[in-house]
Image (cartoon, rainbow, N blue to C red):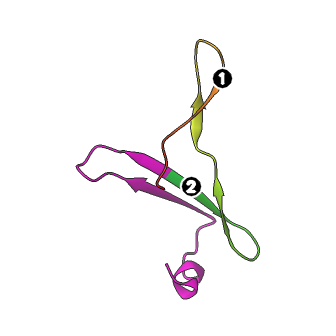
């Protein structure tokens, strides 16, 4: 995305889902700050150990 493309997005958050064959493969979440977008960690808590488990992301 170009700088102009990023400025045209009115929402404060953007979710990018990579699903090449219909099944979600990875996720990335971005938050718009005052001057730029920054990536936020995406994951879940394990029910057994209450450990943070990150979801796969695009590289």
**Residue 17 lies in magenta, yes or no?**
yes
- Outermost residue, right side: 34
For residue 29, which quarter of the picture?
bottom right
Label whose residue precedes the other's in the sequence (2 or 1): 2
Q: Residues within 10 Å of mark 2 (few under 14, many from 20)?
A: some
Residue 28's mark? none
Number of callouts: 2
Secondary structure under tag 2 reads strand
**Residue 15 lies in magenta, yes or no?**
yes
Q: Are marks 2 and 1 in contact (CB under 8 Å)?
A: no
Q: Which residue is mark 2?
A: 29
Q: Position of residue 23 (x, y in %)?
A: 28, 43
| Horizontal side of residue 49 vs 57, given as left or right | right
Q: Position of residue 25 (x, y in %)?
A: 37, 45
Q: Residue at x 48, y 42 (%)?
A: 56
- Of circles 2 and 1, the one toward us is 1
In the rendered structure, which segment of residues is drawn in magenta? Answer: 1-27
| Horizontal side of residue 24 vs 16, given as left or right | left
Q: Which residue is mark 1?
A: 51
Q: Position of residue 43 (x, y in %)?
A: 57, 37
Q: Residue at x 51, y 39 (%)?
A: 55
């Amino acid at each position: 995305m170009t700088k102009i493309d990023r400025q045209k997005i009115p929402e404060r958050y953007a979710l990018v889902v990579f699903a090449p064959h219909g099944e979600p493969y990875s996720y990335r979440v971005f938050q718009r700050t005052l001057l730029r977008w920054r990536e936020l960690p995406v994951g879940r808590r394990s029910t057994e150990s209450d450990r943070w488990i990150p979801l796969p992301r695009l590289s």
